Amino acid sequence: MINFHPHVVHFPVALTFALFFYEAWCFFRKEEGSTHAKNFLLLFALLGALAAVGTGLWYEEFMPHPHEGAAHNIMERHETLGYVVLGVIVLLNILNIYFGQKKWGLLSYRLLLAVAAILVGYQGYLGGELGHTHGLSLPEGVHPPAHMQQILEEDHHLGDEGP
């Protein structure tokens, strides 16, 4: 069975960062920016986040994965943060649609977008740990490279402290 999650997660990451840098560019240049560009990036970041959460839940339900240890702790944190990121992207869309024309709405939107970029960056880090360090993105029966096995065996990596 194919794990689609690693294939779709890069869209909300890229779109959230593109939106963040676009808004930063507009802010420092004291420009309003293109409403169409912002709406496009927000909509597709939301669709990408929905796809990422959906495929992550599908992975959890139908793909073999660890239910204990460091990888499991990271996976639980990754799942929870996935819901948080999705919620933040929904809030960004609401702020943009209903309050984006007001000064406080734009400021709130941009501050929340900065938070979203930080959360998405951390979420990507956790996903990378799961996929590359712990080998969860590898096909079933394929093990992580030898240098990663040592890290896994020492069990001192991210996630040891528990949820």
Image: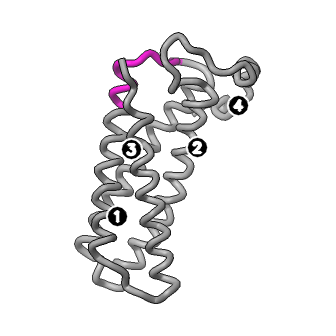
For the residues bearing labels 2 and 4, Cβ distance under 8 angstroms: no
Give the image location of residue 114, x and y in percent.
50, 66
Q: Earlier in the sequence, mark 1 or mark 2?
A: 1
Residue drawn 37% across the image and 78% down it: 106
Residue drawn 56% across the image and 31% down it: 130
For the residues bearing labels 1 and 2, Cβ distance under 8 angstroms: no
**In the image: residue 87, left or right of residue 79:** left
Query: What amino acid type should be assigned to the residue bearing mark 1?
Result: Leu
Q: Nearer the viewer, mark 3 or mark 2?
A: 2
The picture quadrant where one finds residue 100 is bottom left
Q: Earlier in the sequence, mark 3 or mark 2?
A: 3
Q: Which mark is residue 31?
A: none
- Helix, strand or loop at label 2? It is helix
Q: CA distance from mark 3 to mark 4?
A: 24 Å
Q: Which region of the structure is painted magenta?
A: 56-67
Give whichever of 62, 148 is nearer the camera: 148
Q: CA distance from mark 1 to mark 4?
A: 33 Å
Label 4: few (<14), some or many (≥20) within 10 Å? some
- Helix, strand or loop at label 3? It is helix
For the residues bearing labels 3 and 4, Cβ distance under 8 angstroms: no
Q: Nearer the viewer, mark 1 or mark 2?
A: 2
Q: CA distance from mark 3 to mark 2?
A: 16 Å
Query: What amino acid type should be assigned to the residue bearing mark 4?
Result: His
For the residues bearing labels 1 and 4, Cβ distance under 8 angstroms: no
Q: Which mark is residue 83?
A: 3
Task: Locate the C terminus by quadrant.
Answer: top right
Give the image location of residue 90, x and y in percent.
31, 57
Give the image location of residue 140, x and y in percent.
49, 14
Q: Which mark is residue 92?
A: 1
Residue drawn 39% across the image and 71% down it: 109
Q: Which residue is mark 2?
A: 125
Q: Which residue is mark 4?
A: 157
